[in-house]
Image (spheres, rainbow, N blue to C red):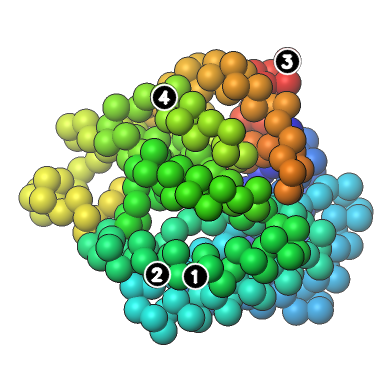
Amino acid sequence: MKIAFDVDVLAKQMGIDAMVHQVADWGYKYIEQSPHPRINPFYKHPLFSRECEAEYRKALRDTGVEISSFICVYRWSGPTEEQRQMAVANWKRMIEIASSMEVPVINTELSGDPNQAEICNGMWYRSMEEILPIAEREGIRIEIQSHPYDFCELNNECADLVKSFRSDNLKYVYATAHGFFYDQGKGDHDSMLRYAGDDLSHVLFADTFNQTLDCRYILNPPWLNGRGREDVTVHQHLGLGEGDVDFDQIFRTLRDMDFAGREFKVGGESICAVSLFGFPEKMDVQAPAARERIEKELLG
């Protein structure tokens, strides 16, 4: 099992070389490269100039850190055909970059519109018809997570989308910070992880509050708390133990499923990625602490 750090919070405050060295200083052997303005920006075509690649490769060599996975976010679910086609072009380039960097895993979202779920569902399947054969040819494992404010927010429904392809190149991501969206506030992580079953290849670790409980989050005007669920969505990626997520249950289930021992036909080992946003001033404490807890709970 690979334990990685999602570098989103670092990319916003330092260059690539410093970012890689910081991950190494926190004791991580792997980076999960989330959308980066010089590499794979949100929704736009990937960049990754020769100079950027050279800087990144040197930093990896100097530290011994490796990239476990890329995260990309493109509108491959539309809702317009123009958006979908541009997203597929972005995907093709992203797969080229991952293959060139010898990174066998790309983690992503459905990236649709919850107000147009039927259209987005069809658009996503259309995109998969184009992208999955390329991933199969290049030996890339694509991993899907449902996400707050997407055309599919539910764990079991998204797992079924993944499972419908019956492909070794398509697997499922469980994000602990989204768990209360995954089952509409119940937070039954055990049930959801087991439903993903053998297709669960990646877990993102961060805490959050249960958005369905009164006043965990406050939105104005007040009616947005009730009627605006599809137009306003709030969630956080807090340090482990700062929110409502039951991590004892999550770790217990992952141990029972032998998640740490999983080896997939495509992409190799399972991945745990620490995915903390919003509080860079806490990272020096939270990032090593999260790694240490995952090691203790899953590697013993």
Question: Crowding near pointer 2: few (<14 within 10 Å), some, many (20+)?
Answer: many
**Three-letter amino acid code of the residue under disc 3:** Gly
Question: Crowding near pointer 1: few (<14 within 10 Å), some, many (20+)?
Answer: some
Reading the image, the residue beneath label 3 is: 300
Q: Against 190, is 184 above or below? A: below
- What is the x, y in percent for residue 288? 68, 32
Nearest to N terminus: mark 4 or mark 3: 4
**Three-letter amino acid code of the residue under disc 2:** Met
Query: Position of 281 compared to 101: left or right?
Result: left
- What is the x, y in percent for residue 196? 49, 35
Give the quarter of the figure containing the N terminus.
Answer: top right
Q: Against 21, is 260 above or below? A: above
Measuring 64% from the left and 66% from the top, which residue is drawn there? 133
Q: Residue furthest left?
A: 223
Nearest to N terminus: mark 3 or mark 1: 1
Reading the image, the residue beneath label 1 is: 127
- What is the x, y in percent for residue 251? 56, 20
**Three-letter amino acid code of the residue under disc 4:** Ser
Reading the image, the residue beneath label 2 is: 123
- Name which quarter of the figure residue 110 lies in: bottom left
Reading the image, the residue beneath label 4 is: 191
Query: Position of 37 compared to 137: left or right?
Result: left
Q: The residue tagged with tag 2: helix, strand or loop? A: helix
Instruction: Look at discs 2 and 3 and give the one toward the viewer.
Output: 2
Q: Against 257, is 36 above or below? A: below
- What is the x, y in percent for residue 206? 50, 36
Q: CA distance from mark 2 to mark 3?
A: 43 Å
